[in-house]
Amino acid sequence: MQKLLQAYQAQVEAKKPIPQENAKRYVPAKIKNYVLVKTNNTCAFPGCTKKYKYLHHTWRFALTKMHDPDSLIPLCKPHERLAHAGLIENENQSPENWKIKLEADKTNEKWLKADKWVAEYYTGKR
């Protein structure tokens, strides 16, 4: 079974599209499909089985203008909100390493240049 899983993962990895710098928010179909196949259209947060709602850029799109299949993660709405609240520890690592933080680091670049504004938008303060 392990060999079968490894063969499937290698097959998926072989089809990985190259990252695209793009000034538009639209995620190209090749990248989107590649990312979703890896999680079977479900949220990638450890233990979550909900259908994904958002493709989350772990390196914020607002900062990089890049759609990189290695840093696009499918998340359900609650986990996407946690990510933009700065409450996911190890966010730049693979999702199996993610943990929920008790408090956001409001001094890091992601918070100051992107997440702060997203959080204000979600709470109606913007």
Image: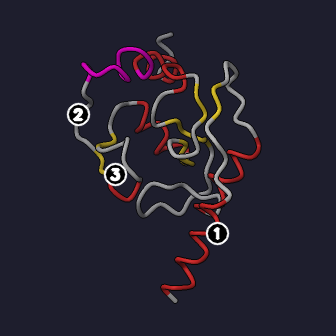
Q: Residue 81, how many percent across, how many down?
A: 46, 36
Q: Which residues are magenta?
A: 106-115
Amino acid marked by disc 1? Gln
The answer to whether 85 is drawn above or below residue 78 in the figure is above
Amino acid marked by disc 2? Glu
Q: Residue 17, how many percent across, how many down?
A: 67, 47
Q: Residues within 10 Å of mark 1 (few under 14, many from 20)?
A: few
Tell me how far mark 3 sits from mark 2, CA to CA.
14 Å
Horizontal side of 21 relative to 80 (left or right) equals right
Amino acid marked by disc 3? Trp
Residue 102, magenta (yes or no):
no
Horizontal side of 114 relative to 108 (left or right) equals right
Q: Which residue is mark 3?
A: 98
Q: Residue furthest right?
A: 29
Q: Which residue is mark 2?
A: 103
Q: Which residue is mark 1?
A: 11
